[in-house]
Every structure is written in structure tokens, then in C-alpha cells.
Image (cartoon, helix red, strand yellow):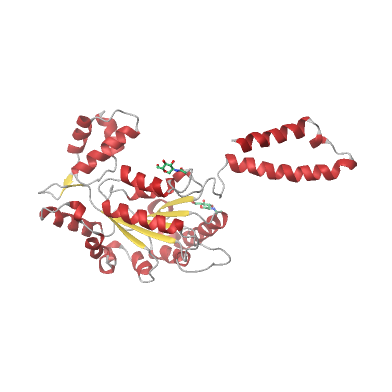
């Protein structure tokens, strides 16, 4: 705050004392000097009020991410740990050799979007609203495969332009939609930015973060969770290596789940594959309680229970996992309260 008051004060003194309007030859040098000074001051004020690509607006808070994952993401002990480690390691690395590339996998409503949001909120003061965060929903941004060539060049220009403006940029690709709709050609065009290049055409992408969200592999992750449940084992016993086969090349590479993974995987461009487990009744309840609190309502166990009970669970016989996960809980609660 001190800096702003000081700058306003400088403005005030310069303007009120007439220096700014003094154009007699004798003081020209001074006016020019003051002009340059004012430009610098003006930039400071601008940077203070408007988001800029500097440490005032961009500062990673590792504790903040840890707390947020702990308090807002439910039922994802594996994903939570991987994300914390991956993002903290990357952000604390002064000289990363490549951008961070995360591929988040799992059923609808399990927290993939939420995780992207928590990462953004703990890097940018403006969170998801930051001008450094770019989210692409493939079915919305790139709907027509006949336009593929246009999309490709546009996407490349956007990535290059935005990283030029701010190296610490995040690009989120939401490939959801029942089937993976991201055209392999679209992935191919961003592949160069994900790799181990010092720079491409003078631009370095090594500070950037790329996040891919998809439900590819979700069915296999669910099978692992179901297997643990049937064996009477604690869900928290599930380890990353139990889920790795579900995210293996053979699974992600099948026709139905889209070919786009293959080209990322065989070049080792993805740093972390992050599995999201399907959510149970108790997790939906936690989501509901958190959602009520977030809406400024007094969390009400009965209301939340009623809402959680009315959701659809699968498999048919056991009814363990919520079909919608925690998705749409916000709007559902409006109905119950
Ligand atoms: C980082 O996050 C923690 C936990 O949310 C918070 O208490 C702390 O004030 C944050 N630090 C900064 C510098 O914002
Ligand atoms: C940055 O990306 C956005 C899309 O998120 C795009 O509209 C904008 O033109 C890009 N900026 C530059 C400088 O390329």
C-alpha cells in the first residue's frame, strides 16, 4: 500500500506544482526526465492494480496447495499425494528441463477440475481468473473436425503468444465428453511445447504447466477400487502402483479411449499420470457439507444425507460409487435446501 500512496503523492506534487505543464525550453530536460519517471511510476501503479506477470501476482504457495487438497478434495488420497509432489517439485525447481505435464484420469465428478483449480489458486493471486490460465474444452473450442487445420494453427499461436507474455502459464485441456474427443492431430501440434527444448523460435516453454483431463482409464481405475472394496480392504490402502496397470499404454491406447495418449506416452512427454478414484456415498456427503459451507449456509447433515441418498450409485447390485461423483452437487443442494 505504501508504494501506491507514494506514487499518488508524486503525481500530486508534479501536477499541482505545474511541472507537468511547464514547457519552457529551459526546463524541457527536466520535464522529459519527469516524463520518464512518470512512465515508470505509471507502470508501477498499473502493475499494482492490473494483473502482471510478476511475483506480486504469481507466487506458489506449497502449504496452501497442501491445505486446499486436504480440505477440499475428498476420497483421492493417491491423486492428492501425486499432485502435491509433482507441482511442488516443479515450482521449486529454478531450472526445469521441460514444462510440467500432468494427465488426470478418472470418472466424472471425481475432482479433476477441482484439482486444476486448486493448483491455479495456489500459483496465481487471481486463481482461475488469471490471464495466465487457459482452459480449453475440446468439444466447445474445437468442435468441428473439418476445421482441424485452423484449430491447430490457432492453438499454436495462442500457446506461443501467451507463454511469450508470461512464461508461467497454465494450459488445461478438458478432453471429457463421454468419449475422448481430442483429435490426435490437435495433440500432435502441441507436442513440441511439451518436450525438452531449451527454446522454440526464441520462446522457452519450460516454466509452463499443461494439464490434460480425461475419463480415459476411468473404468479400469473403478475396477481396482471395486476389487479392494469386495476384498474388504480399506480404500486408503490403494497405492499408486495398484492403479498403474489401469493407466498403462495398453489400456489408454485402445481405440475407444482415443489415440491421443499414445503419442504423448511414447515420447514420455507426460510427467505424471494421476488416477482419480470413483467416489462413495461418504465422499459425496463430504462434498455436500463443503458445498453448503462454501455457499455460506450452515452445513446441515440431514439435508446433505437426503441429497446424497437420492443420487445414483453403481454397480447395480452393490451401489457403491456415485455415477456423477460430486458433480452437480452445488445445484442439487439448491433443490434440497
Ligand atoms: C499460504 O497458504 C496458507 C494456507 O492456506 C496460508 O495460511 C498462507 O497465508 C498462504 N501464504 C501466502 C504467502 O499467501
Ligand atoms: C492467449 O490465449 C487465449 C485463449 O485462452 C487467446 O484468446 C489469446 O489470443 C492468447 N493470447 C495471445 C497473445 O496469443
Out of 63 and 143, give the one closest to the viewer. 63
Q: Position of residue 333 (x, y in %)?
A: 27, 33
Q: Name the foreground residue: 42 vs 251.
A: 42
Q: Nearer the viewer, residue 82 or 276?
A: 82
Residue 310 percent across, percent down from the top left = 18, 37
Q: Is residue 66 shown left or right of residue 235?
A: right
Q: Is residue 57 left or right of residue 292?
A: right
Residue 247 occupies quadrant: bottom left
Please identify the quarter of the rendering in which residue 215 is found: bottom left
Q: Is residue 117 visible?
A: no
Q: Position of residue 289 (x, y in %)?
A: 27, 35
Residue 135, given in percent of the width and then of the height, sits at 43, 51
Say if residue 189 shows up in the picture.
yes
Q: Residue at x 65, y 44 (%)?
A: 43
Q: Quadrant of residue 330?
A: top left
Q: Residue at x 35, y 29 (%)?
A: 296
Q: Nearer the viewer, residue 134 or 291?
A: 291
Image quadrant in which the N terminus is located: top right
Q: Quadrant where the C terminus lies?
A: top left
Q: Is residue 265 above or below residue 83?
A: below
Q: Relative to residue 309, is residue 268 depicted above or below?
A: below
| Residue under the image location 59 percent in, 41 percent down | 48
State whether residue 115 is above or below residue 220: above
Q: Residue furthest bottom?
A: 266
Amino acid at each position: 500500500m505504501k508504494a501506491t500512496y507514494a506514487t499518488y503523492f508524486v503525481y500530486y506534487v508534479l501536477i499541482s506544482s505545474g511541472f507537468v505543464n511547464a514547457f519552457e525550453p529551459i526546463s524541457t530536460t527536466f520535464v522529459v526526465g519527469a516524463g520518464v519517471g512518470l512512465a515508470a511510476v505509471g507502470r508501477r501503479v498499473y502493475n499494482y492494480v492490473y494483473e502482471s506477470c510478476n511475483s506480486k501476482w504469481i507466487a506458489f504457495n506449497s502449504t496452501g496447495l497442501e491445505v486446499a487438497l486436504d480440505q477440499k478434495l475428498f476420497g483421492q488420497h493417491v491423486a492428492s499425494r501425486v499432485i502435491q509432489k509433482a507441482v511442488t517439485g516443479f515450482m521449486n525447481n529454478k531450472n526445469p528441463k521441460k514444462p510440467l505435464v500432468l494427465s488426470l484420469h478418472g470418472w466424472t465428478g471425481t475432482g479433476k477440475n477441482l484439482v486444476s483449480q486448486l493448483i491455479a489458486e495456489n500459483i496465481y493471486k487471481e486463481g482461475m481468473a488469471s490471464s495466465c490460465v487457459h482452459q480449453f474444452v475440446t468439444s466447445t473450442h474445437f468442435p468441428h473436425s473439418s476445421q482441424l487445420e485452423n484449430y491447430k494453427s490457432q492453438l499454436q499461436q495462442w500457446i506461443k503468444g501467451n507463454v511469450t507474455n508470461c512464461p508461467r502459464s497454465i494450459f488445461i485441456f478438458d478432453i471429457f465428453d463421454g468419449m475422448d474427443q481430442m483429435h490426435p492431430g490437435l495433440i500432435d501440434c502441441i507436442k513440441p511445447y511439451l518436450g525438452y527444448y531449451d527454446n522454440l523460435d526464441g520462446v522457452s516453454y519450460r516454466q509452463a504447466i499443461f494439464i490434460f483431463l480425461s475419463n480415459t482409464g476411468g473404468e479400469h481405475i473403478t475396477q481396482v477400487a471395486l476389487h479392494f472394496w469386495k476384498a474388504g480392504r480399506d480404500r486408503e490402502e490403494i497405492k499408486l502402483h495398484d492403479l498403474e496397470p489401469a493407466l498403462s499404454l495398453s489400456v489408454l491406447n485402445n481405440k475407444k479411449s482415443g489415440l491421443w495418449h499414445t503419442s504423448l506416452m511414447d515420447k514420455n512427454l507426460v510427467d505424471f499420470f494421476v488416477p482419480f478414484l470413483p467416489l462413495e456415498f461418504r465422499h459425496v456427503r463430504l462434498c455436500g457439507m463443503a458445498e453448503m459451507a462454501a455457499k455460506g449456509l450452515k452445513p446441515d447433515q440431514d439435508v446433505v444425507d437426503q441429497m446424497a441418498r437420492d443420487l445414483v450409485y453403481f454397480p447395480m447390485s452393490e451401489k457403491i460409487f456415485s455415477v456423477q461423483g460430486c458433480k452437480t452437487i452445488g445445484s442439487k443442494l439448491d433443490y434440497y435446501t
